[in-house]
Image (cartoon, grey):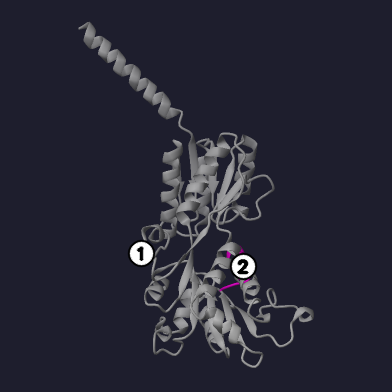
Amino acid sequence: MKKILSLVLVLALLLSVTAAFAAEKPYISVISKGEQHMFWQAVRKGANDAAEQYGVEMYYYGPPSEADIALQVEALNGELAKQPVALALAALSTESVMSQLAECLEKGIPVIGFDSGVPNAPEGSIKATASTNNQNAAGLAAEEMLKLEGFADALKAATPEAPVVLAVLSQDATSESVTGRTTGFVNKMSELAAAYGTVIVVGHDLWATKPEAAPENPTIIIHVEISATPETADVTNSSNSVLNIPNLYSVFLSNEGAVNGFLAATNAGSDLADGGRYENLVVVGFDAGSPQKNAIREGWFAGSITQDPYRIGFLAVELAYKASQGEEVADVDTGAQWYNAENIDNPDIALLVYD
């Protein structure tokens, strides 16, 4: 009987120790901009893996759509009531979370931004942000484009009478991510192309070469086309304008919206196929989605750039944990990857290229 009682006491002690240990696990709240889209599913997987690695309890929430600002704020309020040791936040609207940011500052809850983060947040309210450096990512597109067979030769062969036109199509000139990508591609391609000829940037005023700096007799023209609105119909109209540019050699599409509008202007991409109207056009995209993935598999696009949503989620939780432990944290570029028909189905890439 004594042995049984002793065993019961030992088990009870073990259970109490286990419960105490579990109760001591840091609790981190992760509030994202979405959950249903495969991009956010990859973000969530990265966050889960980081939570497991660092031994934290994590709650992840994403609203049904990125228009559901009120639902995101409601979830955020519910999480702050639980007194998390840290918060990771991708805000749908900075204005809508101002009071919550102030509450976190007052209570000493470190806030980590991720993906688009919390743009224009009050100084000191965000400890660090884990996000894609869009300028660097689009610069990678320019680098990979120049590596394509025949691309550098086309730049070398260009003359003032028959210049080469490298177009950039973006759905807007206002959003931070899209403008960053437009700038990154224009700057990097201008830098690289200068080794092969005289470069000028034309089109939208934000990126066009200033008149006083415009070179005489340019041989390489980077044309920046911005859609009137992000709506597919308007992007399609802008795509048609680009496709009508004389001496057009390549097009960089700066996000999924630009890709979809461009595909609509090319008969779902079939005009880019062998024997099609634009069979020799070099096209490089950004982001993913089923239409773009199909265009890459078919060989209509030379390749595309994808963000790393898994790494965004992982680093959001990692930074949140470290900040909760009093460690100094700083912004992190979560990187980007080039993918094409050769590597699109590789496991490390397939995780990143959502449908």
Q: In this view, does 308 lie above or below 166?
A: above
Q: Position of residue 295 (x, y in %)?
A: 40, 76
Q: In this view, does 214 lie above or below 329?
A: below
- The residue that disc 2 covers is 184
- The residue that disc 1 covers is 345
Q: Quadrant of the C terminus?
A: bottom left
**Which residue is more in the foreground, 66 or 291?**
291
The chief SS type of the magenta part is: helix
Does residue 242 appear to the left or right of 159 in the view shown? Answer: left
The kind of secondary structure element at disc 1 is loop
Q: Position of residue 80 (x, y in %)?
A: 53, 40
Q: Where is residue 143 in the image (x, y as percent from the top left)?
A: 55, 69
- Tell me which segment is drawn in magenta: 171-183
Q: Which disc, if any, is residue 332?
A: none
The kind of secondary structure element at disc 2 is helix
Q: In this view, does 266 lie above or below 64?
A: below
Report if residue 103 lies within the magenta region: no
C-alpha distance separating marks 1 and 2: 27 Å
Residue 63 in view in this figure:
no
Q: In this view, does 232 lie above or below 307?
A: below
Q: Earlier along the polypeptide chain: callout 1 or callout 2?
A: 2
Q: In which quarter of the image is the N terminus?
A: top left
Q: Position of residue 341 (x, y in %)?
A: 39, 71
> Which residue corresponds to the image point at 40% horizontal and 77% vertical from the top-left?
299
- Type of residue at label 2? Gly
Q: 10 Å neighbourhood of mark 2: few (<14), some, or many (≥20)?
A: many
> Which residue corresponds to the image point at 41% horizontal and 55% vertical from the top-left?
41
Report if residue 174 lies within the magenta region: yes
**Which residue is more in the foreground, 220 or 108?**
220
* Residue at the farthest top position: 2
> Which residue corresponds to the image point at 38% horizontal and 25% vertical from the top-left?
19
